[in-house]
Amino acid sequence: MGNDLEKVLYTEEQIQTRLAEMAQQIDADYAGREVLLVGVLNGAVMVMADLSRKLQTQVTMDWMAISSYGSGTKSSGVVRILKDLTTDILGKHVLIVEDIIDSGLTLSWLVSNLRSRNPESIEVATMLRKPEAAKVDVDVRYVGFDIPNEFVIGYGLDYAERYRTLPFVGTLAPHVYSS
Ligand code: IMP
Ligand code: MG
């Protein structure tokens, strides 16, 4: 796996430090209210696990699986629910937890889908955000890092379902894409 890497963008330590800052901000914003964290499978698993454990806020968790990407590196723009929430979000404070926002198409669709279920509030936290995301009209309240328009892997993010377990975020060597 080591040979597949090109460079590390954010180390494990940088990620954890940033998540702690985000958690403090979330705790301050929700001040004593209970929050339902909605993780987007599979990529957000790591962010969800680490961010949630840094929160003082009382939280519950639920998960959605949606597909917008194939096994390649380009967004298809088509969103499909593979697994819906098990919780009723009516009247709840929902915080969507995302790994990365690229085109923003997935998130934009998700926010309007969840909004139609009448939560008390809905906000978004993402570990990474790419420049393209600015074009979509979705307010992202908590952003870990704004990154350049590069394909990244690690810390939940995959290329063809691999590399999710790396504790850091990095880019892949060109030979990985051509093989
Ligand atoms: P969007 O709809 O273009 O914002 O795509 C969002 C989803 O695409 C993310 O939740 C990821 O699953 C995937 N994605 C976007 N960029 C990357 C990347 O650089 N590496 C790995 N997955 C990515
Ligand atoms: Mg995702």
Image (spheres, rainbow, N blue to C red):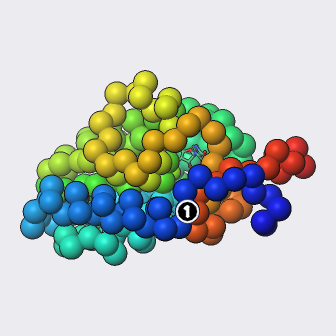
Left/right of residue 99 with respect to residue 8 in the rendered view: left
Q: Position of residue 25 (x, y in %)?
A: 22, 57
Task: Say how many tags the image has.
Answer: 1
Give the residue at x 26% y 70%. Answer: 55
Q: Amino acid at mark 1?
A: Thr
Give the residue at x 56% y 32%. Answer: 77
Residue that sits furthest to the left in the current view: 32
Left/right of residue 74 with respect to residue 55 in the rendered view: right
Residue 109: quarter of image: top left
**Residue linked to disc 1:** 11
Give the residue at x 26% y 41%. Answer: 116
Instruction: In the rendered view, tell whether residue 115 sits above or below residue 30.
Output: above
Give the residue at x 63% y 39%. Answer: 150
Q: Position of residue 85 (x, y in %)?
A: 37, 60
Residue 54: quarter of image: bottom left
Residue 111: quarter of image: top left
Q: Nearer the viewer, residue 40 or 28?
A: 28
Q: Nearer the viewer, residue 52 or 121?
A: 52
Q: Position of residue 69 (x, y in %)?
A: 62, 43
Asked if ligand 1 lies within 8 A of label 1, the reply is: no
Tell me if I can see residue 106 in this picture.
no
CA neighbours of label 1 inside 10 A, class few (<14), some (14 to 19), many (20+)? some
Residue that sits furthest to the top in the current view: 135
Instruction: In the rendered view, tell whether residue 17 sits above or below residue 120.
Output: below
Q: Nearer the viewer, residue 66 or 176?
A: 176
Tell me if I can see residue 162 in this picture.
yes
Question: Which SS class for mark 1?
Answer: loop
Left/right of residue 17 with respect to residue 90 in the rendered view: right
Q: Position of residue 136 (x, y in %)?
A: 40, 27
Where the N terminus falls, by quadrant? Answer: bottom right
